[in-house]
Amino acid sequence: MTNIRKSHPLFKIINHSFIDLPAPSNISSWWNFGSLLGVCLMVQILTGLFLAMHYTSDTMTAFSSVTHICRDVNYGWLIRYLHANGASMFFICLFLHVGRGLYYGSYTFLETWNIGIILLFAVMATAFMGYVLPWGQMSFWGATVITNLLSAIPYIGTTLVEWIWGGFSVDKATLTRF
């Protein structure tokens, strides 16, 4: 009797895609972090969508909406903490992925490396925006300090900061922009 995973048409596809997939002999577990980033990203997107269903982006109600999610929404506390800890796990995998790229010399592939660096900055900006959304004291002062860093840009810095804030200080317009 022949092996069913190599003779059955459906199992044959799965076998060639997952089990007998040709792979380099020097591959190690360090190469899993790209896939783990994809899994973490999917968890972040799903939990973020569920959180967005109950979040209000107003300075007077943002913090209380987060409290409402944790206390009143069924399993809202679980979704929020999965989202918060998922962000930490995402960055752990991201830094290990970048570290692996540095160790194995992936920076020699300039186009791929440059796209990765652009994605790194985009992810950091997205994480900062998510950090501001609960609108607690840490979020408020985080938004104030980080956006004020842009004022160091010559000539346009202060104008850029006021444009991001939507006025002369961090307020309602700032929160709705994040």
Image (cartoon, grey):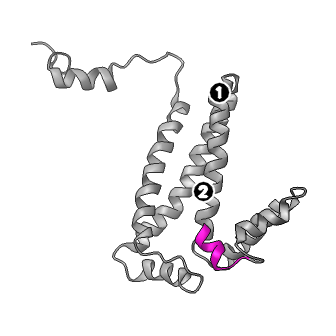
Direction from residue 14 to residue 122 in the image, left or right:
right
Mark 1 burial class by Cα count in 10 Å: few <14, some 14-19, many 20+: few
Direction from residue 60 to residue 138 in the image, left or right:
right
The dot on residue 126 is 2
Percent x, y of residue 28:
52, 26
Q: Residue furthest top?
A: 1
Between 55 and 42, the one nearer to me in the picture: 55
Mark 2 burial class by Cα count in 10 Å: few <14, some 14-19, many 20+: few
Question: Is the stretch drawn in magenta largely helix, strand or loop?
Answer: helix
Quadrant in the picture for residue 111: top right
Between 27 and 160, the one nearer to me in the picture: 160
Q: Amino acid at mark 1?
A: Glu
Percent x, y of residue 32:
50, 35
Residue under circle 1? Answer: 111
Q: Please name the residue shown 47% across and 38% down the image.
A: 35
Element at badge 2? Answer: helix
Quadrant in the picture for residue 47: bottom left
Could you tell me which quadrant the C terminus lies in? bottom right
Q: Is residue 178 above or below residue 171?
A: above
Residue 104 appears in view: no
Taking the magenta stretch, the answer to whether it contains residue 176 is yes
Between 154 and 148, the one nearer to me in the picture: 154
Q: Please name the residue shown 66% across and 41% down the image.
A: 118
Question: Residues at badges 1 and 2 in contact (C-beta under 8 Å)?
Answer: no
Percent x, y of residue 159:
81, 65
Q: Is residue 78 above or below residue 59?
A: above
- The stretch of residues the image draws in magenta is 170-178
Cα–Cα span, label 1 and label 2:
23 Å
Taking the magenta stretch, the answer to whether it contains residue 175 is yes
Percent x, y of residue 17:
32, 24
Could you tell me which quadrant the N terminus lies in? top left
Q: Is residue 141 above or below residue 7?
A: below
